[in-house]
Amino acid sequence: MATQTKYIAVKTAIPGPKSQAVLERLGQATPRAIGMPAPLMIDRAHGSLLTDIDGNTFIDLTGGVGVLNVGHTHDRVKAALHEQVDRFLHTDFTNIPYESYVRLAERLNGRFPGGGPATSIFFNSGAEAVENAVKIARAYTKRAGILSFERAFHGRTLMAMSLTSKTHPYKAGMGPFAPEVYRAPYPYPYRCEFAGNETHHICDERCYRNIEKALLLQVAPEDLAAVIVEPVQGEGGFVVPPQTFLPWLRKFTENHGILLIVDEVQTGFGRTGTFFASEQAGIRPDLLTMAKSIADGVPLSGVMGRPEVMNGPDDSQIGGTYVGNPLATSAANAVLDVFDEENLLVQAQRQGKHLITRLSAMKDKYSLIGDVRGLGAMVAMELVKDHSTKEPAPEETSRVLNTLIGRGVLMLKSGIYGNVIRSLAPLNTPLDMLDEALDVLEQTLAEVNGL
């Protein structure tokens, strides 16, 4: 039986005829390297709703892959952009500066996890932020090595891709990679090799010893400039580590004089229920990378960190023509206004609890769901063929997602096996709208699960 809908309006087959015509042109005009999981062409969007050129309206739980925490085309952001367009579009901040860049840095510095002084510098993308965080770390420490983790995703430029662990589709055939990159295991509670009948505390301790062992077999700690880590792994499958992990890692890096770079590109800007996920771990990073929801879809990223570390590079060693452009910094300042005015952190916490409750109830019904996990509104479920073996179910995952599109709900998958369905809904998505999408999801899961 079809789910009753208030927000969804699917009027044609997906793709509709107009979208299909453009998709055929896309296939001729662009290379196959451009992935396209949703076979539709957007016409307009607002909040958490997206309408294609055929007039079909979808509930968008992809959030632009975590970019739209304040929602599509937020009115305050639109107003800031229109106002900026009428004033000026570009100067290159390093030649002719403007106040919106400075104001944004000041406001973000005041949110630096762990408190204390901080400075910020801006770029265009998450990958650029990671590349420059590595440059800053090397300039400050005079060391070369960088440690990242299994299943990590840090971007697709050379250094960022080298730090990324997921080989397909991001790294296969793309070598050689940047040197002096090392890898260690990242705790994965659902698939912990040390789990069993023992307590999580013992499991955590053994996992951390394994990380130390993996490191010591590859590189001397005194040769490492930095460790880079996601507080919750995003593309790796929304893997939430034990609460003790980041504090342990912070202590480990301090003991060896290694900088800690926390990659908050996806976890930042309220996604996990605090402005930055690092706050929940009670740690102060040396450097923090940010992007995605910083400017509601206008390309912008940044690196924030301890002033003495940020001052490692010399004058003009860091920068770029478009970085921190006035449109983006104006939009980002408006995003910060929205967080304050709409109390988005509380909304993120409420959304996360609602998602966990609904998905956990589905897990009790459908054997296809092996795990439900998340932090704040960064929530996902992992699909498996068998609960005892935990064999991944990527084919079933794709079937669920493809069916959802035809029923007016947009979601994404992640994980190294492609079997994790994740929600990156705007934080201000109304709960009744979220429930409508979840009702469609449950109906689809029941069908794919064979119930």
Image (cartoon, helix red, strand yellow):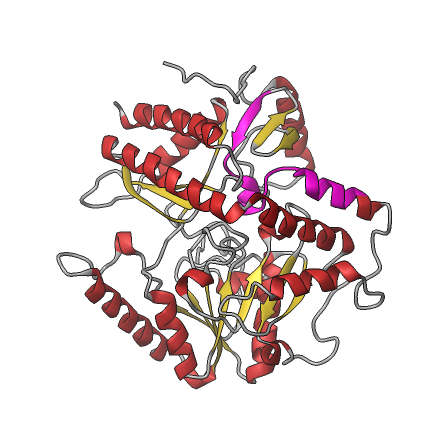
Q: Is residue 339 above or below residue 214?
A: above
Residue located 83% across and 51% down the image: 89
Q: Is residue 147 left or right of residue 29?
A: left
Residue located 77% across and 55% down the image: 326
Q: What range of the chain is rendered magenta?
A: 56-82
Q: Is residue 418 visible?
A: no
Q: Is residue 271 above or below residue 264?
A: above
Q: Is residue 288 above or below residue 389?
A: below
Front residue of this view, candidates 387 and 107: 107
Residue located 62% across and 68% down the image: 132
Q: Is residue 59 above or below residue 307?
A: above
- Residue 16, by quadrant, is top right
Q: Is residue 24 visible?
A: yes
The picture places residue 437, in percent across and down from the top left corner, at 45, 28
The picture places residue 50, in percent across and down from the top left corner, at 59, 29
- Residue 185, by quadrant, is bottom left
The picture places residue 319, in percent across and down from the top left corner, at 72, 68
Does residue 63 belong to the magenta stretch?
A: yes
Quarter of the figure with the C terminus: top left
Q: Is residue 302 left or right of residue 278?
A: right
Quarter of the figure with the N terminus: top left
Does residue 83 belong to the magenta stretch?
A: no
Front residue of this view, candidates 285 and 123: 285
Residue located 73% across and 52% down the image: 330
Front residue of this view, candidates 150 and 82: 82
Total labels drawn = 0
Front residue of this view, candidates 322 and 242: 242
